[in-house]
Each structure stands twice: as C-alpha cells, then as structure tokens.
Amino acid sequence: MIKAADMMIARRADTKARADFATWKMMAKLNGASALPDEAQTFLVSYRELLKQMTEPEATDATINLMYRAYYTEMGGKGTAPDVRAHLSEPVVDNVTAFKRPVPQKTKPKGGPDAKPRLPVALIFACLVVVYVGFRYLWR
C-alpha cells in the first residue's frame, strides 16, 4: 500500500527528473555537458547507451524512469517507487514553435487627410515674441 506522503515524494521526484533531464539534454546539445555534475553526466552516458538499443522516445522515457527511481529513494521514499504517470501510447514530441516576426503596424502618412496640421517652430516663436513685445509697449 502506498501512503500519501510517498505519493507526494513520487510526484516531486518525477517532476524533478523530467525537468533535470530536459535541462541536461539541452546543455549537452549546446556542448555544455562538461559543466554538468557527475550525476548528470552519468545519466547522459546511460541515455546515449540506450539510444543505441532503442528509439529516442523510448530511451528518453527509460532514462527519466531511472532518474525518477534514484530521486525517489534520495528524497526519502520508502520501498519501490510507484508509477506516477500513465505511459502514453504515442511518443512525446517537443512542443516548440518557430519564431515569427510580428507584422509591422501601418503608420499613418504624414501628409494625408487625417494628419494634424503642424505649425513650424519658428512661427510659434515669432508669435510669442510679438505677444511679448506687444505687452511691453502696451503697459508703458
């Protein structure tokens, strides 16, 4: 009989195994496997050995299962690790979409009928000078 505490440990171990394997596999693809800890390198070597014997999804599942069982005992689970996830009949495929540039937004033409009329800065400055000089002469 599996206790609730052991089931929680099993779920955490499974989640950690899946996340760690994905991270380690990506690091290996980016030629960063030498920076991984010894445990990770050991699991990656076993993964490569399994790839020679079976397909990639099967080797991935088997390696994650090995990691899960190791994590389960490491986290304090008692007995054999229970099956947490039901095995899928179809292999898991990466869910990555290609990056697409967003469509550029259309800008309004500056000289079109919807454009606001803009006064030149020099004309505004000249009007301010006229108003200032007018007030100066008016108040004298």
Image (tube, grey):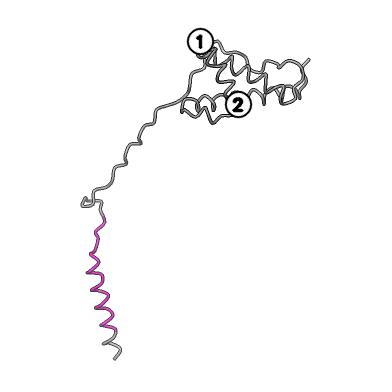
Query: Where is mark 1, residue-wise?
Result: 52
User: Does label 2 or label 1 sit earlier along the sequence?
Assistant: 2
Magenta stretch encompasses residue 10:
no
Prevailing secondary structure of the magenta residues: helix
Counting from the top left corner in percent of width and height, residue 105 is at: 32, 41
Q: Which residues are magenta?
A: 116-135
Counting from the top left corner in percent of width and height, residue 114 is at: 25, 51
Position of 93 compared to 112: left or right? Answer: right
Q: Nearer the viewer, residue 80 or 35?
A: 35
Q: Quadrant of the N terminus?
A: top right
Query: Where is mark 2, residue-wise?
Result: 38
Q: Secondary structure at mark 1?
A: helix
- For residue 77, what is the image quadrant? top right
| Above or below, 44 relative to 132 | above
Magenta stretch encompasses residue 126:
yes
| Above or below, 129 relative to 31 | below
| Above or below, 137 relative to 69 | below
Which residue is situated farthest in the top direction here? 53
Position of 101 compared to 67: left or right? Answer: left
